[in-house]
Amino acid sequence: MRGGRRRLAGLDLAKVEAGKLDLTPAPVDLGDFLQGVCNIVRVKADEKDLLFVHLLPPTLPQAACFDDKRLRQVLINLLGNAIKFTDRGQVSLHVTWVSGSDTQARLRFEVRDTGPGMTPEQLEVIFQPFEQVGDARRRVSGTGLGLPISRQLVRLMGSEIHVDSQPGEGSCFWFEVDVTIDARSAAPASNQDVVVGYEGPRKTLLVVDDIEGNRAVLVDWLGLLDFDVHEADNGVGLLVKAQALHPDLIITDLAMPQLDGLEATRRLRRMPECAGVPVIAVSAHPTGSDPQQSLDAGANVFLPKPVELDRLLHQVGVLLRLTWVVEQPRTAKREAAPFLR
């Protein structure tokens, strides 16, 4: 059966390379399409006890014209690879609007993982047919054609797959494609305003999590709203940076090495210069006691992971007494948040 899959995949690759495979764009509900992709890969992530995060900003077009079959194939290949080679932490899909108008949009798709990362030598061969990198235990489970086919399909879409990776620091595969916005098939636009910033002086936030990918999710989103966001990877770093920065608010994970979020919050409350800093505690695998333990330790709010942006912003706004700056979805800021390498 494995040989049959390899022959079929090789046939797909040969068709693309020979120019015999055409794209078939059609109107697609973008939200439903992306949710369907996420539902497929989330099952695999759950099997490995990995956190799967997908970030879909409200400024994405509701409906667009593209070849959903081929784009789905690319995303599932990239996400499937990320899950296969990641044993701890998370895999995430980020979709952002890079540029466009009322009729055209350039969308950026990023697949990030907290896996082992790759060396420069490995990066040179991963897109070659039948080449697989990583340990043998994982290599035998694939054909070695997923990435070459994905690259050719993205090229057929007029783009290129890029990779950012360092050994021990995970990987990010990303590409950008142009789509035509299909206004006729779109549902009526939501009247809900989109938060694009806040009034008053710039606020400093501290995000604390031992998993870099988790921090990046919050840093990207909060930075887009013009917060000055700093990071720490454990409770010791939380206390050191809290003393140095005097942040306006801290968002901290609970389970971390060296010093967990609960004990770090207790010690923070005993520091006169930081005793009044609002703290939002978060946890990927909350138990029934976590919310109360967090509050008892001195946290102001507890939120389960994956953190919902709207819910987080609501709590940040309440704790910092912010007045949000909002715009209608069509005119809201569409630039992608800066990606922290």
Image: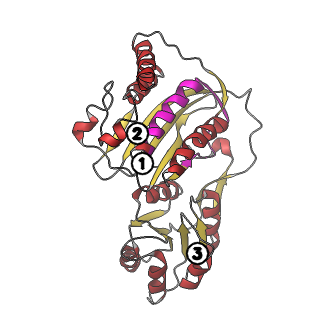
Earlier along the polypeptide chain: callout 1 or callout 3?
Answer: 1
Along the line of sight, the residue nearer the viewer: 166 or 63: 166
User: Relative to residue 294, is residue 150 depicted above or below?
Assistant: above
Contact, mark 3 vs mark 2 (Cβ under 8 Å) = no
- Near mark 2 (Cα within 10 A), the count class, few <14, some 14-19 or many ≥20, is some
How many marks overall? Answer: 3
- What is the residue that sits farthest to the left in this orientation? 121
**Point 62% across, 43% down: residue:** 59
Q: Which region of the structure is painted magenta?
A: 54-83
Image: 321 above or below 14: below
Residue 265 drawn above or below residue 89: below
Residue 189, picture quadrant: top right
**On screen, residue 66 above or below 338:** above
Mark 1 to mark 2 CA distance (whole Å): 9 Å
Tag shown at residue 65: none
**Residue 32 or residue 147, whichever sits in front:** 147
Tell me, yes or no, whether the highlighted magenta stretch contains residue 55: yes
Q: What residue sits right under mark 1 in the picture? A: 113
- Of callouts 1 and 2, the N-terminal one: 1
Q: Position of residue 230 (x, y in %)?
A: 41, 65
Q: Please give the residue where the numbered disc 3 appears in the rendered image.
A: 290
**In this orientation, does residue 29 appear?**
yes
Q: Which label lies toward us, 1 or 2?
A: 1
Numbered mark located on residue 173 in the image: 2
Front-most of residues 50 and 219: 50
Q: Percent x, y for residue 16?
A: 43, 15
How crowded pointer 3 is (Cα within 10 Å; few <14, some 14-19, many 20+) is rated as some
